[in-house]
Amino acid sequence: MKALKDNLLEKCHSDFINICFGDFPIREVKNSVSQNITGYGTNINEKIRSFLDFISLLNMQREESEGIDMTFDFVTISKTVFSEGKSAVFIDEGSVKMTIDNKPIELFVRLSSIFEFENMKWMTIHFHGSFPQGEEGDPDTWSVNEWKQKNERLEQLIEKRTEELRQSLEHLKATQTQLIHSEKMASLGELTAGIAHEIQNPLNFVNNFSEVSYELVDEMNDELDKRDIEEAKHIALDIKQNLEKINHHGKRADSIVKGMLQHSRKNTGKKEPTDINKLADEYLRLAYHGLRAKDKSFNTTIITDFDDSIEKVNLIPQDIGRVILNIITNAFYVVDEKKKSEIKNYEPTVTISTKQRGKNIEIYITDNGNGIPKTILNRIFEPFFTTKPTGQGTGLGLSMSYDIIKAHNGELKVDTIKNEGTTFSILLFNNKKSNR
Ligand SMILES: Nc1ncnc2c1ncn2[C@@H]1O[C@H](COP(=O)(O)OP(=O)(O)O)[C@@H](O)[C@H]1O
Ligand SMILES: [Mg+2]
């Protein structure tokens, strides 16, 4: 009986090795492997908690090794039977040989397996397979040398990646600088076109009045020849009035040019008492004519509502001007887009208004575009956030505006309603008197 039982144990053990490394038929596995089998394969993911786990592991292994010629050779290192012959532990060592891509490969394997005798049968109830790590002859139990080498390789890899990251960061920074520059240039472009238009207007006056005056001088001379002093004096008065107009419009052109220089000059960052209404009106015109210069078809109704009671506010005019320009340009863009979508009875309208509330001054810029979708509303002030096609938007307008208003201790807010439009409000605190 004892010999038979031992034969059965040997058979069960050799079956198990055959199941794991050979071609033991899967459908017969249940005859020698317990339904409650647990175990660990050589791979970290190979955890067996049930018979089904075990079968799927086998299936996977066989699929992987399909078409590959494999041979194996195991030697039992120890065999212990205990619990009055009811349990046994085997420890085996061996190797699996195969040829992959014409290269012979030999994998060393250690296998421990536990067997249980029940209902007159031996069954495998647990196993643990592993690949001995480390180089052959490595005296180091914990493979310290190997880990060291691995770490070195890792460090080199990290160094390489860090260098790559550093380079792409540098590239990104350069691109950002370039974009910031191009946003400034874009707003300068809009300004220049607007300013050219603005200057044209006083220049027309200057030209017309000087031409008329030229003719008037001839007429005056005629009257003097005729000794009609009265009429000559009358004409002289007209000439004088014309000269006043020429002077007035000349000065207008002068101040426009000065304004332009102020904008293009490096920001002095100086705050000065500023007429907000005038500033808003000026930049509104610049934005409008700037856009018209680029796109003749652009058209929109513009409504202004300026609060005349506003006192001068201490601020950096070029900066606040740039904010107004940015927001108005965005507003023009959205009403133009909406108009191009050919919505019935749509009248593109941009409104700019100012209001004094106590010490605070508020500037509102409203458009009747399609509004800002909720999904992007919290992103519009982010640098480089844009929904415009490449080349049309830098995504810097609002982030710059936000920074400028913050530097003025003010607030920049946005209210938007789907399909109806958007209002940007600039809140400035007039601290001129409090001298903060
Ligand atoms: N009045 C507006 N109506 C709808 N969306 C707007 C409006 N103003 C700004 N946006 C959105 O905010 C984004 C960021 O604006 P901005 O910072 O000025 O950059 P850019 O104009 O270059 O896109 C725009 O691309 C657009 O999606
Ligand atoms: Mg913009």
Image (spheres, rainbow, N blue to C red):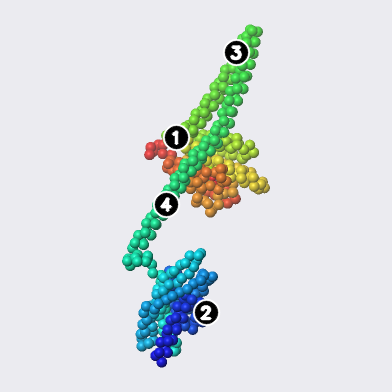
4 or 2: tag closer to the N-terminus: 2
3 or 1: tag closer to the N-terminus: 3
Give the structural element (helix, strand or loop) at label 1: loop
Viewer-side label of 1, 4 = 4
Compute the Cα span from label 3 to label 1: 51 Å
4 or 3: tag closer to the N-terminus: 4
Q: Residue at x 41, y 78 (%)?
A: 113
Compute the Cα span from label 3 to label 2: 128 Å
Viewer-closest of 391 and 261: 391
Q: Is residue 46 above or below residue 172?
A: below
Q: The residue under label 4 is which amino acid type?
A: Lys
Q: Is mark 3 within 8 Å of ligand 2?
A: no
Q: The residue under label 1 is which amino acid type?
A: Asn
Q: Residue at x 60, y 35 (%)?
A: 293
Viewer-side label of 2, 1 = 2
Q: Is mark 2 within 8 Å of ligand 1?
A: no
Q: Which residue is mark 2?
A: 25
The crowd level at tag 2 (other Cα within 10 Å; few <14, some 14-19, many 20+) is few
Compute the Cα span from label 1 to label 4: 42 Å
Q: Which residue is mark 1?
A: 267
- Marks 1/4 in contact by CB < 8 Å: the verdict is no
Residue 14 on image: x %, y %: 44, 81
The crowd level at tag 1 (other Cα within 10 Å; few <14, some 14-19, many 20+) is few
Residue 160, disc: 4
> Could one spot residue 357 in this view of the protein?
no
Viewer-side label of 4, 2 = 2
- Marks 3/1 in contact by CB < 8 Å: the verdict is no
Q: Which residue is mark 3?
A: 233
Give the structural element (helix, strand or loop) at label 3: helix
Give the structural element (helix, strand or loop) at label 2: loop
Q: The residue under label 3 is which amino acid type?
A: Lys
